[in-house]
Amino acid sequence: MRRLYDLAIYLLTIALHLGAPFHPKARAWVAGRRHWRARYATGFEKKGRVLWVHVASLGEFEQGRPVIEGFREKFPGWQIVLTFFSPSGYEIRKNYPQADFVCYLPADTRRNARYFLDLIRPDAAIFVKYDFWANYLFELKKRSIPTLLVSALFRPNQPFFRWYGGLWRQMLGCFTHVFVQNKPSGALLRGIGFEKVTVAGDTRVDRVLTPPPAPPPEGPGAGLIAGSTWPADEDILLPLLNDPAWAHLRWIIAPHEPTEKHLAHLLPRIARPPCPPFGMERRTGGRSGCG
């Protein structure tokens, strides 16, 4: 099964390289990992104990951020290495000041996993939510490096809980402890014999509540911001936006994938005149009358 996984990683890497000339995210994914061994070797030097934190993209980074900043406050002598899988997270947070080194996670091959861990030599590792990479996890376990999964969320239809999910359950066994968002996730893990689990809630809530929020604004200047939305989120938000009872609010909706195709589908569903997407003001002649 692991050989099939390695083949899948190999094919994924080839597909991303082939798609790079045609897709901006694939192009950024490939460019960010080009000559990574030489760049990482000169960009990072271990000077003490190291915590490695891995996130998939920007949303997972925001979930991991309270953990990173709490850890930094409690253990100021540690170095923190922060890795991203997706360009949409890395490009925005590559200069994050609470981390000593921010980089892309190299493709999950056995050779890359060994080289990367030899380079940063982490004393502990934290994965956020659900970005599982088998070769990195197996190598961490082989080296007896404590590895945590935080803000995890599990559903019955995931491979961990299906007959064909043996490799996924092996990956799960690489974690020293798993902190899940809710009780159903904890019950699913215990149902397959994984007992090293704690229900700890969603760290995104900690992110919003730190510092404590100010009272909601009132009057004509009040507004709401919905960030990194998916179509399912927008199906809930748009009826509220179009409801006269919410007409006094100004809205900012930032889709997770702000492509022209998605915006062309989204804008006609907004009853009140919308502001043009960011960067289009000059082409549309301004923002007057937008909501």
Image (tube, rainbow, N blue to C red):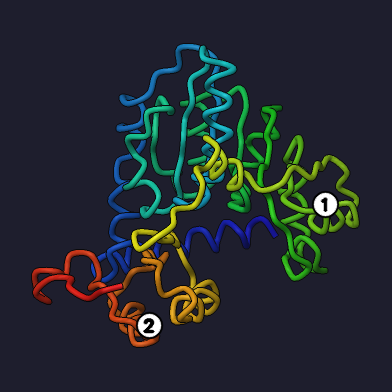
- Image quadrant where residue 67 sits: top right
- Image quadrant where residue 37 sits: top left
Instruction: Identify the residue at horizontal 39%, vertical 86% (top origin).
Output: 269
- Check the image and name the residue furthest to the front: 219
Question: Where the C terminus falls, by quadrant?
Answer: bottom left
Question: Where the N terminus falls, by quadrant?
Answer: bottom right
State the separation of the CA atoms marked 1 and 2. Answer: 39 Å
- Read off the residue under disc 1: 186
Residue 13 visible to an observer of this rendering: no
Q: Amino acid at mark 2?
A: Ile
Return the disc, 1 or 2, that comes first in the chain's sequence: 1
**Image disc number at residue 270:** 2
User: Along the horizontal axis of the image, is 79 left or right of 133?
Assistant: left
Residue 276 in picture, x, y percent from top left: 23, 73
Against 2, is 63 above or below? above
Name the foreground residue: 20 vs 38.
20
Q: Secondary structure under badge 1?
A: helix
Instruction: Identify the residue at horizontal 22%, vertical 76% (top origin).
Output: 289
**Image disc number at residue 22:** none
User: Along the horizontal axis of the image, is 47 left or right of 271?
Assistant: right
Residue 55 in picture, x, y percent from top left: 52, 45
Residue 136 visible to an observer of this rendering: yes
Against 209, is 73 above or below? above
Q: Amino acid at mark 1?
A: Gly
Residue 145 in picture, x, y percent from top left: 67, 27
Residue 273 in picture, x, y percent from top left: 28, 81
Q: Residues within 10 Å of mark 1 (few under 14, many from 20)?
A: many
Against 155, is 269 above or below? below
